[in-house]
């Protein structure tokens, strides 16, 4: 592809694909293939209707949706009109949405009326009363104040926007869990996201017959890249699973000949388990990039075992710096793939000490990176102040080192986040919710690595109670839900303690709470597990 292709918006790119190859199959979703012309016409009609509703360049439109084909039409319309898209994960509830939608001043949101036993429409209509900027609630596949289907039906499928949208204009605001308990808006341009997509495709060595299995949700940057950007930016087809089911995913791979996937450890473990149980080893799936949670080396080894030419590897990245390290170019090296987090993928990556000084190979420090796919910055200047070194290197908040071969090895976290099944969860957010419980004096929440868990880390709460009043984990979890947080933020373990291990400055030493082998846990029987 010509280099200037990557300077076009996804709307411009899809229009070109539809003109040159109208019958090209780009996305498999909902049991059918969507062609370039069908996707482009749907996107144009939606753009026409959104413009008629008064949405203008720079306005933010949010989405909270399953892995549905409508994601491409919404992205097309946003790119054509110069709107800023704000994908939100499906698990978020009132507390998270209230903050995000207010912060970005979203003018419209696309939601399913209901999905997975949750009434999204009722939730959103109630929240709309608190959000003066939110003028339009648009429902997907169901009734509501305004429906996606009605906007497409009344819009012109040949509509052409006259808005001038440049590659460095803001394209996306995606919120990531912050260590302060407040989610931070990550800003990406059309160019940064196209660059990330191209870097990743180059790393994979995409062939004409390659097709992606999309595992992550479109509300996450990873799922969005593979579901929306791969088909348009790389003209490489993708197939989406609406929600994860390993048997259904296997059938998609079998019938469509899907060849590559990226996802959290739990997905790859399920694929390996399915192969063992059924004897069918997913033969067309030649590559799996695994990240978002700790990846045991044996998982990588088991996937490639006995499969000549198959590749699996650990990878590293975040919303701010997506797919920043992946497999090392050249012949597949199983040891590197299983024991490191990959080689810089279009980024400069360094380990630095607390003063920002470059550390030599093998020396642990904070992982910092710089590159063309790096975010433009956070939405608010105060979030940027401590996030970058003066030379533009982004401070990831992750600890690690660069080995002698230039590979990245992540060893831990500086930032106070829990990684559960590929989802970043703010410990501070849960602590703030629990601190309002009348029976709790002080609380600390940490992620405890569990090698037997599909999700990688368990959410553990360490609680100092007020007085002797008894309480249960179920009671605290009910309190967490009552504050409006997502159910995925409930405690999976709870410990009652008399005191916390503290630094000389009075800060809780969460590394000791996480490590049950540490003498702090054994001495004086300080931590008592409560069911």
Image: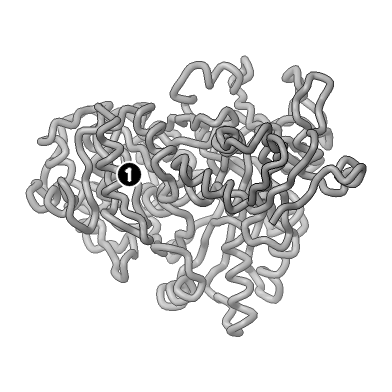
Residue displayed at 60% across by 61% down: 266
Q: Give x and y (percent) for residue 145.
A: 15, 46
Q: Is residue 113 visible?
A: yes
Using residue 46 as the reference point, say whether residue 383 is left or right of it.
right
73 shown above or below 442? below
Residue displayed at 44% across by 50% down: 91
Residue displayed at 84% across by 42% down: 526
> Dividing the image into 4 quarters, which one contains the C terminus?
bottom right
Using residue 264 as the reference point, say whether residue 332 is left or right of it.
right
Q: Residue 514's image quarter?
A: top right
99 shown above or below 277? above
Q: Give x and y (percent) for residue 43.
A: 21, 48
Q: Nearer the viewer, residue 177 or 240?
A: 177
2 shown above or below 247? above
Using residue 230 as the reference point, say whether residue 281 is left or right of it.
right
Residue picked out by circle 1: 63
Which residue is most to the bottom? 279
Residue displayed at 72% across by 30% down: 366
Q: Nearer the viewer, residue 530 or 501?
A: 530
Classify 10 Å Cα crowding around label 1: few (below 14), some (14-19), many (20 and above).
Answer: many
Q: Is residue 12 visible?
A: no
Using residue 492 as the reference point, say whether residue 68 is left or right of it.
left
Q: Residue 38's image quarter?
A: bottom left
Q: Nearer the viewer, residue 126 or 412?
A: 126
Q: Residue 36's image quarter?
A: bottom left
Q: Give x and y (percent) for residue 12.
A: 26, 41
């Amino acid at each position: 592809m010509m280099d200037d292709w990557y300077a076009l918006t996804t709307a411009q790119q899809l229009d070109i694909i539809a003109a040159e190859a109208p019958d090209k199959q780009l996305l498999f979703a909902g049991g059918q293939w969507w062609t370039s012309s069908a996707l482009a016409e749907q996107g144009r009609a939606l753009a026409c209707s959104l413009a008629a509703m008064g949405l203008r360049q720079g306005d933010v439109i949010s989405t909270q949706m399953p892995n549905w084909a409508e994601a491409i039409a919404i992205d097309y319309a946003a790119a054509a009109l110069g709107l800023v898209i704000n994908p939100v994960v499906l698990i978020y509830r009132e507390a998270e949405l209230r903050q995000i939608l207010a912060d970005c001043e979203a003018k419209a949101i696309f939601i399913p009326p209901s999905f997975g036993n949750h009434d999204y429409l009722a939730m959103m209509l109630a929240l709309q009363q608190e959000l003066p900027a939110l003028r339009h609630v648009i429902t997907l596949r169901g009734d509501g104040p305004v429906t996606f289907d009605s906007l497409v039906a009344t819009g012109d499928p040949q509509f052409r926007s006259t808005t001038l949208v440049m590659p460095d204009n803001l394209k996306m605001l995606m919120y990531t869990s912050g260590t302060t308990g407040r989610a931070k808006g990550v800003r990406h341009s059309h160019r940064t996201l196209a660059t990330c997509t191209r870097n990743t495709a180059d790393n994979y060595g995409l062939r004409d017959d390659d097709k992606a299995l999309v595992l992550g949700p479109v509300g996450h940057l990873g799922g969005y890249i593979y579901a929306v950007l791969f088909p348009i930016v790389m003209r490489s087809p993708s197939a989406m699973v609406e929600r994860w089911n390993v048997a259904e995913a296997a059938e998609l791979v079998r019938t469509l000949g899907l060849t590559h996937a990226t996802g959290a450890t739990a997905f790859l473990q399920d694929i390996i388990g399915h192969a063992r149980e059924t004897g069918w080893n997913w033969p067309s799936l030649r590559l799996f990039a695994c990240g978002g949670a700790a990846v045991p080396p044996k998982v990588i080894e088991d996937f490639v075992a006995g499969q000549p030419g198959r590749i699996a590897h650990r990878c590293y990245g975040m919303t701010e710096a997506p797919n920043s390290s992946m497999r090392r170019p050249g012949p597949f090296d199983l040891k590197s793939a299983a024991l490191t987090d990959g080689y810089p993928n279009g980024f400069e990556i360094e380990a630095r000490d607390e003063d920002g000084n470059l550390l030599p190979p093998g020396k642990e420090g904070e992982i910092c990176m710089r590159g063309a796919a790096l975010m433009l910055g956070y939405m608010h200047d105060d979030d940027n102040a401590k996030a970058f070194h003066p030379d533009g290197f982004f401070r990831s908040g992750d600890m690690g080192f660069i080995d002698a071969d230039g590979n990245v090895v992540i060893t831990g976290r500086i930032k106070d986040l829990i990684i559960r099944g590929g989802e970043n969860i703010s410990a501070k957010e849960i602590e703030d919710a629990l601190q309002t419980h009348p029976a709790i004096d002080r609380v600390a929440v940490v992620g405890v690595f569990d090698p037997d868990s599909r999700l990688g880390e368990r959410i553990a709460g360490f609680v100092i109670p007020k007085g002797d009043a008894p309480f249960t984990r179920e009671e605290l979890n009910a309190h967490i839900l009552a504050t409006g947080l997502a159910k995925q933020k409930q405690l999976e373990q709870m410990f009652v303690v008399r005191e916390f291990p503290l630094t000389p400055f009075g800060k809780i030493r969460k590394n000791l709470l996480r490590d049950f082998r540490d003498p702090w846990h054994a001495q004086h029987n300080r931590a008592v597990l409560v069911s």
